[in-house]
């Protein structure tokens, strides 16, 4: 989730925010009432107060704020153990009133699998997260149901507010919640409390406009003319293109992608191939890159010469290196606006805190603003118009969990370029044979033979062979005691099976081992859980899935996203729970639907999840059928819609075009569903991919199409 905010800086922002908000008549009442609620919050915290058992060396005389800053230093340095101790000390010493310290301590404990005996501490921590967020929403959240035009403009609202100067309520937050929205992704809150994740995002988004003006320990006045007026942008475009609009003629719409992650980040691994396939007659692509390029030695040695950033530069119409605006989000908004970007797509969400373009989107540089791919939850921002999704991931009955309208793509909303990247090899129905006693080699041997790289996969005293290998290569923060108990039951029901996990982070393994030993009936079960280290090269990391894993056991409620696509393209089926509401919890469910593997979706929850996994491990014929069906989707030509990047891009740009046409027509905003024409339903072939590549290269060179 990036760096933790500095406590003094955070306090100053909150003080200023309170002063700003109390001057707004809409929020006077909620501001005056909050002192009554604080007493309730104090009562709430009292139920969690325990004796501070952490080390107090050299911190006795530190204030809660100083402890918080010390914890932040440890956190940013990657020392999670000390960071957790100091955040917890800050929390306790404040009398549990510095809630951000308390909730950040919870976040680090989830990373370190500090779940307590049989998960009791984790359960307590989740109560803290839910009840703190709920209490803060009551204190700091208010709604203006009939905003006037000035309020609409100041909030950066889009064209959904153009009609009669209104359109929907404006949500105000006096300060942010103590839980960062990116931290919220992995928390298994009760379904009836799913709205709290939206609240965390809302509060974060509400601070972005102020954050954009924060410098030298103060909030500067907002520059004149910001946020940009959406209605004025529409009127200007209509006036300038009235003749074309009357004749029904359109020119390519200008689409911008903004992120600090145009380097070796997961979002670019998955999505850099998109830029090869945009139709230059439909869209003109601009990339606004805030981040640093990768170190040349990293590209040469670790990436073996593959530079995703350079591939993007080579395939887009305009690549804007805007690192000069890294700490000038007002300047960035002005720069993007000066390029007349009509649709702006945000690729950072709330990841990479301290690096992302915080505050820029709130200044409304583009009339249509969209969240795509990186942050799989609502932005909570009233200035983000749409989120790209699909009907399985975001069914219409869950729209209250989002502030955006949906752009529904057919098939699967998630971009992935595995099938068109030469560095990634497609799976094979047959495993390459491995000689007895031979050292491990990628792509050689069955998962049973490779046994998670363990010399004693079933325990030191066992001479039997591994029957089946389950895996999960997600970060530990995506898992929780309930998920781990499911995995233990699966192992116990499938004799001689093993579980292969990624040690991420390694500091969590002792805590996880302790929980496992405390939870199993038979100690031998714990001997069948093994860990592999992180592989820096993403192509080798992906290839390990086939070599080390028969079936991936998905995390819930924070699914594997990049790791899931890696597994699927390695021919590794995924068993997932399908009973969640969160966007991040439904990604694999949608994948299995598109791939024709709905039988692996546990709609009924935990017990069904376990039963499906057990059947795969004990019914070899069914496992071969499922695996074979998955591999066929990877190998099929024309391409299967799940893996077909040109088809994905065609549908994606259709969604953007529909959003733009709706805006120019002056219609109210609504959900958009992209429906493929019958002529567009044939999958891509290698020939069509080569033809599109050639056409785009010629276009970028200025040759005739």
Image (cartoon, helix red, strand yellow):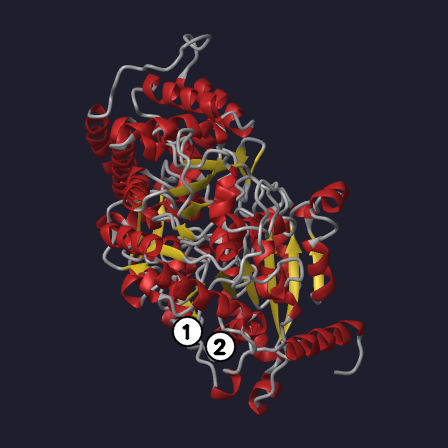
Whether residue 223 is visible: no
Identify the residue at horizontal 76%, vertical 41% (top origin). Answer: 297
Instruction: Please give the residue where the numbered disc 1 appears in the rendered image.
Output: 672
Q: Residues within 10 Å of mark 2 (few under 14, many from 20)?
A: some
Instruction: Please give the residue where the numbered disc 2 appears in the rendered image.
Output: 658
Determine the residue located farthest toward the bottom in the rendered image. Answer: 247
**Compared to 115, does 638 lie above or below?**
below
Image quadrant occupied by the C terminus: bottom right
Q: Residues within 10 Å of mark 1 (few under 14, many from 20)?
A: some
**Compared to 454, does 92 lie above or below?**
above
Identify the residue at horizontal 61%, vertical 40% (top origin). Answer: 439
Side (left or right) of 530 relative to 657: left
Residue 100 rendering spot, x and y as whole percentages: 38, 31
**Residue nearer the viewer, 3 or 106:** 106
**Residue nearer the viewer, 352 or 470:** 470
For residue 159, the mark is: none
Residue 410 rendering spot, x and y as whole percentages: 44, 73
The answer to the question of whether label 1 and label 2 lie on touching residues, with beta carbons closer than 8 A, is yes
Secondary structure of residue under mark 1: strand
- Label 1 and label 2: CA atoms lie apart by 7 Å
**Residue nearer the viewer, 273 or 567:** 567
Residue 261 rendering spot, x and y as whole percentages: 61, 49
Determine the image quadrant of residue 347.
bottom right
């Amino acid at each position: 989730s990036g760096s933790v905010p500095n406590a003094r800086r955070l306090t100053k922002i909150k003080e200023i925010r309170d002063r700003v908000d109390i001057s707004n008549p809409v929020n006077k009442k909620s501001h005056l009432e909050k002192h009554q609620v604080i007493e309730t919050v104090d009562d709430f915290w009292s139920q969690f107060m325990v004796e501070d058992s952490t080390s107090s060396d050299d911190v006795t005389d530190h204030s809660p704020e100083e402890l918080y800053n010390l914890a932040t230093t440890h956190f940013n340095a990657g020392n999670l153990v000390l960071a957790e101790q100091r955040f917890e000390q800050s929390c306790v010493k404040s009398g549990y009133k510095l809630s951000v310290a308390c909730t950040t301590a919870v976040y680090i404990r989830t990373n370190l699998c500090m779940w307590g005996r049989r998960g009791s501490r984790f359960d307590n921590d989740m109560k803290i997260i839910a009840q703190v967020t709920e209490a803060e929403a009551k204190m700091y959240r208010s709604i203006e149901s009939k905003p006037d035009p000035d309020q609409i403009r100041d909030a950066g609202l889009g064209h959904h507010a153009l009609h009669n100067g209104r359109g929907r309520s404006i949500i105000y937050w006096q300060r942010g919640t103590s839980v960062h929205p990116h931290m919220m992704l992995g928390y298994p809150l009760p379904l009836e409390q799913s709205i709290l994740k939206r609240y965390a995002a809302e509060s974060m988004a509400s601070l972005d406009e102020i954050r954009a003006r924060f410098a030298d320990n103060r909030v500067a006045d907002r520059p004149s003319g910001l946020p940009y007026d959406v209605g004025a942008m529409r009127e200007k475009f209509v006036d300038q293109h009235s003749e074309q609009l009357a004749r029904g003629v359109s020119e390519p719409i200008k689409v911008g992608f903004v992120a600090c992650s145009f380097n070796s980040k997961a979002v670019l691994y998955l999505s850099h191939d998109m830029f090869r396939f945009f139709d230059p007659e439909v869209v003109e692509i601009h990339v606004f890159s805030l981040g640093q390029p990768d170190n040349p030695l990293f590209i040469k040695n670790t990436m073996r010469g593959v530079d995703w950033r350079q591939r993007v530069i080579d395939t887009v119409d305009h690549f804007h290196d805007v690192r000069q605006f890294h700490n000038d989000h007002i300047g960035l908004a002005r720069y993007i606006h000066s390029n007349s970007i009509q649709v702006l797509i945000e690729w950072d969400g709330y990841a990479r805190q301290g690096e992302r373009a915080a505050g820029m989107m709130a200044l409304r540089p583009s009339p249509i603003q969209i969240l795509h791919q990186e942050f799989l939850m609502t932005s909570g921002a009233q200035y983000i118009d749409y989120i790209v999704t699909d009907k399985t991931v975001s069914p219409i009955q869950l729209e209250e969990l989002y502030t955006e309208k949906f752009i529904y793509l057919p098939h699967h909303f998630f971009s992935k370029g595995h099938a068109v990247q030469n560095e990634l090899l497609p799976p094979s129905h047959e495993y390459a044979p491995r000689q007895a006693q031979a050292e491990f080699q990628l792509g050689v041997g069955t998962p049973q033979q490779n046994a998670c790289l363990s010399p004693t996969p079933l325990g030191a005293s066992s001479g039997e062979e591994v029957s089946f290998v389950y895996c999960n290569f997600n970060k530990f923060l995506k898992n929780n005691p309930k998920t781990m108990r499911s995995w233990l039951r699966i192992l116990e029901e499938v004799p001689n099976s093993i579980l292969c996990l990624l040690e991420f982070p390694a500091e969590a393994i002792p805590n996880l081992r302790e929980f496992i030993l405390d939870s199993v009936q038979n100690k031998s079960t714990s001997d069948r859980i093994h860990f592999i280290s992180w592989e820096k090269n993403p192509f080798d990391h992906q290839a390990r899935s086939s070599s080390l894993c028969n079936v991936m056991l998905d995390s819930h409620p924070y699914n594997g996203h990049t790791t899931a696509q890696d597994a699927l393209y390695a021919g590794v089926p995924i068993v997932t729970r399908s009973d969640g509401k969160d966007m991040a919890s439904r990604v694999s469910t949608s994948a299995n639907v598109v791939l024709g593997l709905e039988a692996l979706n546990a709609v009924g929850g935990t017990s069904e999840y376990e039963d499906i996994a057990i059947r795969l491990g004990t019914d070899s014929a069914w496992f071969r059928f499922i695996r074979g069906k998955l591999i066929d989707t990877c190998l099929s030509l024309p391409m299967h819609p799940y893996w077909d990047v040109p088809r994905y891009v065609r549908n994606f740009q259709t969604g953007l075009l529909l959003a733009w046409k709706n805006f120019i027509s002056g219609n109210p905003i609504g959900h958009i569903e992209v429906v493929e024409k019958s002529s567009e339903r044939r999958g891509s072939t290698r020939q069509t991919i080569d033809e599109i590549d050639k056409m785009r290269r010629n276009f970028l060179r200025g040759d005739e199409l």
